[in-house]
Structure formats: C-alpha cells, structure tokens
Amino acid sequence: MVNLPGDNKVKNRIVIKNGVLLVMDDAWTLYDDGMVVIEDDKIAAIGPTSDLAPKYPQADRVIDARGKAVMPGLVNLHFHSGIGKGYCDHLPLMEYLMTAWYPLTRNVSSQEAYWAAMCSYSEAIRSGATTVNDQWRQMEACGDAAEAIGMRAVLCCDVADDEHQLDSLADNERLYQAKHGRANGRIEVYVGIEWLPLSSRKLLVGARDLANKLQTGIHIHLNESLSEVQESLRLFGRRPTEFAYDCGILGSDCVAAHCVWLSDAEIALMRETGTNISHNPASNAKLGNGIARVPEMVRAGINVGVGHDAAECNNSVDLFSTMKFASLIHRANRVDASLFPPQEVLAMATKNGSKALKHNTGSLEVGKKADLILINLKNEHFTPLVLGEQTNIYSHLLFAANGADVHTSIIDGRVVMEDRRLTMVDQDEVFAKANEAFHTLLKRI
Ligand SMILES: [Zn+2]
C-alpha cells in the first residue's frame, strides 16, 4: 500500500519502467525508454522513464522492463474454449461439426468445461491475450475459470433451437444473472447464437429481444462457409447476413464471426448497422472455408478485429500466429504486398477488438484499464532492433514474433503471468486436468 498526497484512494501501485513502450494510440507514440504507472485497475501515468520516475518514487511493485516491449494486451474477438484439439481435424466444416464438435460440446460436463476453459485461457494469457470473447458450453464453469485465472472474458452460451441439444436463450439469461459484472466487471455476458443452420426466425428475434432487455451484446457466426450460405438460402430464402439483418441481430453491439462469404449487399448491411466483424483467417484456411473479403470490409469502414476461433479449428490460441495469417493471406490472395501492414493488423488485434466489445482497453493511455503485456526483445525474433522514427518493432511483432515471446501479462491491474508462469493458478494442474477432461469426455461419447 502506498499513499501519496492527493491519491489516498489508491490501494495498489505498479510501476513498469525502462521498457520500449508501444502506446498504440492514434499517433503511434513510442517511448524508447518508457514507464507506465498502474494504480489499482487503471493506467495512471505514461511517459519517458526519466520524466515519470521522480514523480512516482513509491510503488508496491516495480517491474524493470529493460530489454522488453510493453504494449496493450491482445483481444481475441472470436474464441471458443476448446477441449478436443487434434481430434478428427482432417474433416471439412460440416463433417467436422457432426463428427467431433457437436458430440463433444453437447456432452461436456461442467467440471470438464472448467478445466478445458482454464487450459484455453492459460494458452490465451501465455500468448498475449488479455481479453477473450468466448462462446461455448457450460459457461458458468468457464466464468469460474476466467475469474480464477484472471482473464478478462465476455461469455455467451451456444444457443440454438431446442432440437439441436445445445443451449437455450433461458440458459443464456441465467448465465447473465449469475456472471455479468463479476470480478470488478472483468466478466461480462453477451447473448450467443451458434449459427443460422441451427436457428429459426423466432430464436433470432428472441436473441435480439433478450440482448435489448439485458442491455448487452450479441455474438454470432455468420457466412462462415459456402454450405452455410446455401443452407440459409434454402431455409429462409435469404443469405445469412441478410436474414440476420431482417431479424434485428446486427448492430454496433453485435460481433459477427467469420463473414467469409459476404456479398456486396451484405457488406453494406454490416456497414449500415455498425456491426463488428471478427476475422479468423487461420480457422477459415484450416477448415477450407475460404478467405474473407477483409480489404472490402475495411474500405467500407467496418470495425474488424481478429480471433483464433477454437483450438479445434486452429490448433493454436496464439493470436500472434493469427495476426501473421491475417496479413499474409490477403497479400497472397490479392497479389499485393501493400495490404495489411504491421500497424494495421496490430490495431485490429488490440483497439479494434476492444472497440467491438466497448471496452476501455486497447491502448496504453491514462484512464484506460491496465491490460498490458511485456514482450521479451532479447532474442532472434527482435534482432536487429531499430527504435525511433524508423522502428521495425511493429514489423517484428507481426511477422517474426510468436506468443512465447510474451514474458509478463497484466489484466485489470493484476499480474496474471510472469516469466511465462501463471500466477493465480497452478499451471501444471491446469494441463493435467484438461488432459484428463478430454479423455473422460471421449470415453463417454
Ligand atoms: Zn467459431
């Protein structure tokens, strides 16, 4: 506990100094030797170490970030906690869903989901994510895991019509009552919709009504595959985004995942409604779903963030690898190396994701929530390192780094991972229990 004149409400102060500070503000401010002051859950000051250090002589904790970059934590905008990575993953989307994903997620117990979520959040934190937008099953258990490990999480159920034996809107409302606003607001609850092939008009309209009643957002899969588009046309006579629009699903409080097969008219609907899109290029590539029209989305002014999707359809929660994909796949596809330069993609994974969820995170600015990561620069990935006007650090972060370069993670002002070890839970127990959860679930189905 430290108290300076005028700030006697501060309970905990962390000072991070001597780091390369990537503010990620609109001016792309970078301090070669910078300092961040965290008071409780917020950023209280930021600037050159030489200016700030004399003003903050006292702290509960001082972290020397020499040889490290300090940047905002990443926002994984489309996330499913995963339990069955590497199981049946040679199949295309529809067959995969029927053979592996639905049997696993329909039958997962709350205990198994807890450890699966814990392992998924562990991988997220240890690869630089400080926020996940998680749609899965047994979400109260996932919320317990997020609270325990220190993750910032937006949770929603996997809602579909009753005959599909997933979650209902009533389940989602119960989750909201149980978890929304928990852990100093670190846990929030959205309304989730699995996707249109498992939905009726009544369900979609009901999802919007529930979101409005609870004053929360919606998280849905849209236009992920060509087969989904065909199924939507067969069921509703409309393409997925058109039908979602008809039912009132779209809006600035909605995160639509994938959006691979959008027509020009559907892009216009996304723009008109201010809907946020999560681009999940690695999952889309692995499942053979195609390449989203992200250059057109960005040109239309749509807010686009990035997500890994699920460990089952990406095999890595590491957003650094997903970010690299998000740049390279469009350069290759459009034969244009000018597309998606490093800063644009890093912004997608930080401030755009934060904006989509209406969070006060995504950049290191005074008054924002203290969600940030320290990255080890003393390795091959960041060599040679150029700072100043001609810096190549953004390039290294996008094209050369991976999640294992993340050294320390702070979420909501708490150190949740340090020197690559989780601080709030026993990491080895997490791996052991998540392994056991998959095997017991598999035996049962
Ligand atoms: Zn998904």
Image (cartoon, rainbow, N blue to C red):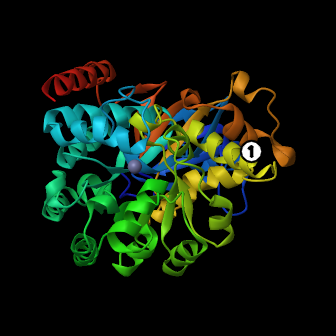
Residue 357 visible in the current orientation = no
Looking at the image, residue 109 sits to the left or right of residue 317; the answer is left
Residue 348 in the image: x percent, y percent? 59, 55
The image shows residue 353, relative to residue 32, as above or below, that is below
Q: Which residue is mark 1?
A: 332
Tag 1: residue type? Ala
Residue shown at 30% from the left, 70% from the top: 216
The image shows residue 197, relative to residue 101, as above or below, that is below
Mark 1 lies on a secondary structure that is helix
Looking at the image, residue 210 sits to the left or right of residue 282; the answer is left
Residue 12 in the image: x percent, y percent? 38, 46
Residue 26 in the image: x percent, y percent? 68, 63
* Quarter holding residue 321: top right
166 and 51: which is toward the camera? 166
18 and 409: which is toward the camera? 409
Looking at the image, residue 150 sits to the left or right of residue 47; the answer is left
Residue 171 visible in the current orientation = yes
* Quarter holding residue 415: top left
Residue shown at 81% from the left, 28% from the top: 384
